[in-house]
Amino acid sequence: MTWHAFAALAITLIIAPALPGIATKTKSVLTGRRGAPVLQLYFDIWKLLRKGAVYSTTTTWVFRAGPVVVLASLLGAAVLFPLDGREAVARFSGDLVAFAALVALARFALVLAGLDTGSSFEGMGASREVTFATFAEPALFLCFVALVLATGELSLSGMLGAALTATWPRTAAPLLLVAMSLFVLLLAENSRVPVDDPATHLELTMIHEVIVLDHSGPDLALILYASSLKLALFAALVMGVLVPRAAWPEPIALTVLPVGLGLVAVGVGVVESNMARLRLTRVPQLLVGAGALALFGIILLLR
């Protein structure tokens, strides 16, 4: 562990709220609209932090703890991820399982908070969220299995570090399939088009937005920031597979980090400007397809 790992973590934490703005701005430009400023989420979070929170009389401590657990879980996942392309702040053999578990814990806490309101509407969104998660999580583990087979490493720092740089010339085709699968998972995990539409006004099609309808003030600010951090982590995962940086000079690797995250966000905006939201019954098929891409990568690695 070096200071570069802490620097990469700090850079990611700072620029995370800009990524949804980059995606939205890209979509706006491509569809002929002006759109909100790229830094709009910073302003929204700051405004919400200065407001008070309103709690329903039907909610319990589960509702109040939800945003804190969500953010803490994703911060823990960020600590385990090699954001500098070399080594994470904390690493151990099998930490890829802990990473996936922390992301799942964040989802679980958010779903519980939504259910704690007693609202059937939020319960509907929570049900959809966990249903899609049952398809997304196996696909994520298939991607990890492919990376383990390609690099022979059981930690995220090993899989996305020097071992990946060494094996990339021989395993480019399966790794490209894994990157494609991870990009689809990024869209699903972060409630982006074509899985969900963060700007939708159609209440019966909401997934993530409906779960957080009862949150307000600082609680909503924590959720918004945690959502942007989750987007940054999955963007870093896609970037880490496509662009191994372990052999690069450390200052250059750190400089490329925000650029790469921004380019992934632009890719999200391009997808959203060219695709419509899928019907809910089609989303599991999309996620199964993402898992199939990773599985094909595994087959190629085993040949």
Image (cartoon, helix red, strand yellow):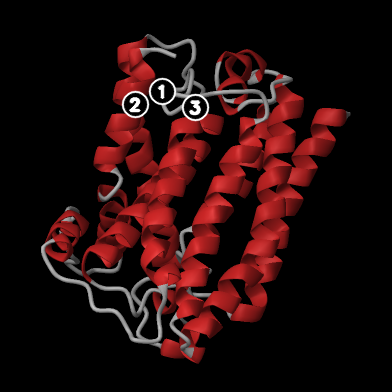
In percent of the image, x 48 and y 87: which residue is there?
118
Q: Nearer the viewer, residue 65 or 41?
A: 65
Q: Circle 1 sits in a helix, a strand or a loop, which is it? A: loop
In percent of the image, x 26 and y 56: which residue is there?
21
Residue behind mark 2: 8
CA gap, disc 3 to disc 1?
Answer: 11 Å
Q: Residues within 10 Å of mark 2 (few under 14, many from 20)?
A: many
- Relative to 18, is 79 on the left or the right? right
CA gap, disc 2 to disc 1?
Answer: 5 Å
Q: Residues within 10 Å of mark 1 (few under 14, many from 20)?
A: many
Q: Quadrant of the C terminus?
A: top right
Question: Which of the numbered marks, if any, corresponds to residue 84?
Answer: 1
Corner quadrant of residue 30: bottom left
Nearest-to-viewer mark from 2 and 3: 2
Question: Which of the numbered marks, if any, corresponds to residue 243?
Answer: 3
Q: Can residue 213 be seen in this snapshot?
A: yes
Amino acid type, mark 3: Val
In percent of the image, x 44 and y 23: which residue is there?
89
Tell me, yes or no, whether the two marked residues, 2 and 1, touch with CB atoms within 8 Å. yes
- Whichever of callouts 3 and 1 sits on the residue coming sooner in the sequence is 1
Q: Nearer the viewer, residue 292 or 117?
A: 117
Q: Circle 2 sits in a helix, a strand or a loop, which is it? A: helix
Amino acid type, mark 2: Ala
Above or below residue 16? Residue 28 is below
Above or below residue 264? Residue 279 is below
Above or below residue 35? Residue 128 is below
